[in-house]
Amino acid sequence: MKNPPRILGVATAVPAYRVEQSEVRRLVENLFREQYAGIERLMPVFENTQIQTRYFSKPLEWFSTQHTFVESTEAYQQTALSLSTEAATTLLRTTAFDKQNIGMVIVVSTTGISTPSLDAKLIQALGLAPNTRRMPLWGLGCAGGVAGLARAAECAQTLSAGKAVLFVAVELCSLTFQRNDVTKSNIVATSLFGDGAAAVLVQMPPESPPQQSLKQLKILNSYSFLFDNSEDIMGWDVLETGLKVRFSRDIPALVRAELPRLLDEACAAWCIQRTEICHCVVHAGGAKVLDAYKNIGLSHEQLSSAYTILQGFGNMSSASVLFALERFMSERQATDELGVMVALGPGFSAEFVLFRW
């Protein structure tokens, strides 16, 4: 594509309650000590994650009691809209983009439900035109940041000149905590997940731009892959008390084994060699998953953006990779080289976006 869609900017937002990993560990150990025999043997998982701080939608004491699905859904709807609005408002301010030129809003979220969907509420909160196109995407989980960005780039090509797509990923993972679930997966989840929102503006460039800007990341292509019969690897189990996380301990091994082949398939579809890729922005699913990414030849330094986001924010599902993208663009000088964004999610699935920066 001669003039591919560009990212005009990225902005992020987190809730008010910043917690230390040690604080969460103490809470979890106190809550489950009587119900989970030998829980102290599981507690080192909090240090093994390499997470230092996270942000929650509610204060820590809120999680000491079980809340109904109604209560957690009300909290989700309020905070998700607030964070989405904050991230989008910051983005519009920092890019000096006229909100009346937003032609479409895409919102990715899997950690709660809302009808009307969040995109409809966000359009009204921002005061956008009533005929703004909208697309809510639910169920993509951790893969949603990359998949949603791919859809935003595709949709940007359908808008009239000067219009842009506002893409938002917002996840409130903490609100899915199950107080009375004493399974290992639930306790491990408490060591990983946090809350956050990210907003991205995607626009087609003018046909004859006065000056090509290297500071605008170019989205060149995308690639998706769905594994057969893999629903048990990652997803939600729906309980009377809400959404219970489901994820397999085999995910790092699966990433290590399958990702090289999938990236080769993506590169073949894009008609490039894997060796041409100079940058990689990945979803920070966890320390073991990040280590597994090194099997495609990535160094720790190349994954530094993801490691930094994991340490400071935990796993924010679909939003994490966009937090990493924001940091990558602020830290790396644009040299017009190829890069790839990668995330994996329920399905089990893998999503890739090819970019130039």
Image (cartoon, rainbow, N blue to C red):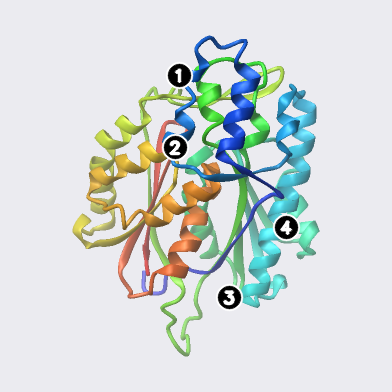
Question: Could you classify mark 4 by the number of other residues whose Cα lies within 10 Å: few (under 14), some (14-19), or many (20 or more)?
Answer: many
Going by the numbered disc 1, the residue's amino acid type is Arg
* CB-based contact (under 8 Å), mark 3 and mark 2: no
What amino acid type should be assigned to the residue bearing mark 3?
Ala
Label 1, label 2: how far apart the Cα atoms are: 15 Å
Q: Position of residue 158 (x, y in %)?
A: 55, 64
The earlier-in-sequence mark between 2 and 4 is 2
CA distance for labels 2 and 4 = 30 Å
Q: Residues within 10 Å of mark 3 (few under 14, many from 20)?
A: some
What mark, if any, has residue 295 been given in the picture? none
Q: Secondary structure at mark 1?
A: helix
Q: Answer above or below: position of 198 versus 6.
A: above
Image height check: is 347 above or below 321? Answer: above
Q: Which mark is residue 161?
A: 3
Asked where in the image residue 281 lies, by quadrant, the reply is bottom left
Q: Amino acid under label 4?
A: Thr
Q: Nearer the viewer, mark 4 or mark 3?
A: 4
- Which residue position holds label 2? 49
